Image: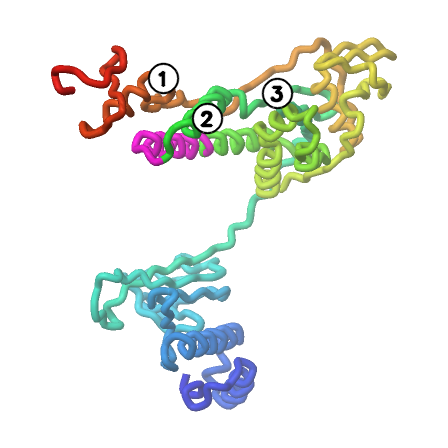
């Protein structure tokens, strides 16, 4: 800090060179790790740059954008000096709030990798002394993940509309098939949302009731989006449970649902509503955390090829029904496709199963849509309200309830 006050143009390389000479000539500095030296120099140079920009040249972490709050982060772990003081790179020795057990290896800084010190002094405090400021220390630790036990199970995913996510799990001897749907529980909410949007578009946008309907619809959609997101996370954990490898189809959903083809407009809306991209993204996140390998396979002809005899023909599939013209096996088309995805990704033969049964499971819970005020008011009531609100001095016809229009009455209405 003294060198920077004397010469503010010094870079961190100049400071490192000068400190190295001082380090070699001072015995007690040789006991300090070099990483602490480099980090302290870097923090001092950063403090000077911020202060020159926002603090009129004073060497303090003072920034208008940060509201004058101190925030220091460092990738070097702190260490104890004694049971009441800890040493932080770039900050020096700091007195702790309580006495700490610092004996190795039982102290709480053992195994830490980095830290961040944030000033949490309330803004309402005026003229706070340096010793009275409140700080919060965030310490990061590296915890190695345990090696997952190998199960030898491979999962294959087939994505569609009628059966959104079909999962085939096999270890080469047995196989299980299941269909997971995270969208069917929210279809009632989707139809309600579309109806509410059309009703709001027909109404006067400046009215108090319309604004109330908009707020109610936005609040409901926010909670509904959280419920769908939670259901997709549950599905990702369900797919990755007890699996070593996950095989997925290399599909470009964004290109498949691109606008331009009016004949497949309903198909595009169905694919976008299921949110295959969000489901796959969550599966990748969970798989990376658990150390599961992701394999992408070519999706061409997976629902037209028999996974038992490998015979491929377009006429084999008819909607959800798959009938192999070579071996005569009858199965569900999506179930057959998921087994082909497994075999193409890992060369593991999926044992043949009988029947077209496909267990279907719905993930998530749909909330009942709220009742909006005046969701669909009839035209008669709107005309009555508009006519009755006219001032008495108006010469326009007034409407009395559901009776005929009149221009003048003896009662003075």
Q: Residue 179 carries which label?
A: 3
Which of the two labelled residues, at mark 1 and mark 3, occupies the earlier sequence position?
Answer: 3
Say which residue appears at 57% left-offset and 28% top-offset. Answer: 273
Secondary structure at badge 1 equals: loop
- Is 40 magenta? The answer is no
Residue placed most toward the observer, 306 or 368: 368
Secondary structure at badge 3 equals: strand
Q: Which quadrant of the structure image shows residue 310?
A: top right
Quadrant for the N terminus, please.
bottom left
Q: Which of marks 2 and 3 is in front?
A: 2
Mark 1 Cα shell of 10 Å, populated few (<14), some (14-19), many (≥20):
few
Mark pair 1, 3: CA separation:
44 Å
Q: Examine the rendering and report whether any part of residue 92 can be seen.
A: no
- Measuring from the top left, give residue 200's x and y in whole percent: 41, 29
Say which residue appears at 51% left-offset and 21% top-offset. Answer: 187
- Measuring from the top left, give residue 110's x and y in whole percent: 45, 59
How is this picture coloured?
rainbow
Mark pair 1, 2: CA separation:
14 Å
Prevailing SS of the magenta stretch: helix
Secondary structure at badge 2 equals: helix
Residue placed most toward the observer, 193 or 360: 193
Question: Answer yes or no: do the residues labelled 1 and 3 have beta carbons within 8 Å?
Answer: no
Q: What stretch is highlighted in magenta?
A: 206-225
Q: Which mark is residue 198?
A: 2
Mark pair 2, 3: CA separation:
33 Å
Q: In this view, does 12 lie to the left or right of 106?
A: right
Q: Which mark is residue 300?
A: none
Which residue position is annotated with label 1?
378
Vertical comparison of 314 with 115: above or below = above
């Amino acid at each position: 800090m003294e060198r920077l006050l004397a010469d503010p143009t010094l870079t961190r390389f100049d400071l490192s060179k000068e400190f190295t000479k001082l380090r070699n000539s001072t015995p007690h500095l040789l006991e300090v790790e070099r990483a602490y030296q480099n980090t302290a120099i870097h923090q001092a140079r950063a403090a000077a740059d911020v202060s020159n920009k926002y603090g009129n040249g004073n060497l303090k972490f003072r920034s208008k954008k940060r509201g004058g709050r101190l925030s220091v982060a460092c990738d070097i772990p702190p260490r104890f000096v004694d049971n009441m003081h800890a040493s932080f790179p770039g900050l020096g020795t700091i007195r702790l709030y309580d006495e700490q057990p610092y004996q190795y290896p039982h102290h709480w800084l053992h195994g830490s990798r980095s830290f961040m010190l944030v000033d949490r002094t309330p803004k309402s405090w005026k003229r706070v002394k340096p010793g009275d400021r409140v700080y919060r220390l965030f310490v990061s630790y590296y915890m190695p993940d345990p090696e997952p036990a190998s199960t030898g199970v491979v999962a294959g995913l087939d994505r569609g509309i009628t059966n959104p996510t079909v999962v085939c799990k096999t270890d080469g001897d047995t196989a299980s098939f299941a269909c997971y749907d995270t969208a069917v529980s929210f279809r009632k909410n989707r139809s309600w949302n579309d109806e509410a949007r059309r009703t709001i578009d027909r109404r006067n946008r400046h009215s108090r009731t319309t604004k109330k309907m908009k707020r109610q619809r936005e609040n409901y959609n926010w909670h509904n989006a959280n419920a769908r997101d939670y259901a997709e996370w549950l599905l990702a954990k369900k797919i990755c449970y007890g699996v070593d490898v996950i095989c997925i189809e290399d599909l470009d959903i964004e290109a498949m649902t691109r606008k331009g083809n009016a004949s497949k407009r309903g198909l595009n809306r169905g694919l976008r509503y299921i949110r295959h991209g969000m489901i796959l993204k969550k599966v990748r996140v969970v798989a990376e955390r658990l150390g599961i390998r992701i394999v992408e396979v070519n999706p061409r002809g997976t629902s037209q090829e028999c996974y038992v005899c490998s015979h491929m023909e377009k006429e084999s599939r008819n909607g959800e029904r798959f009938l192999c013209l070579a071996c005569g096996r009858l199965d569900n088309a999506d179930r057959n496709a998921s087994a082909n995805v497994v075999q193409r990704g890992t060369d593991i033969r999926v044992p043949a199963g009988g029947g077209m049964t496909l267990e279907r499971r719905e993930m998530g819970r749909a909330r009942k849509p709220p009742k909006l005020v005046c969701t669909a008011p009839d035209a008669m009531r709107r005309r009555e309200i508009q006519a009755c609100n006219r001032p008495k001095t108006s010469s326009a016809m007034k409407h009395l309830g559901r009776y005929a229009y009149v221009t003048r009455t003896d009662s003075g209405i």
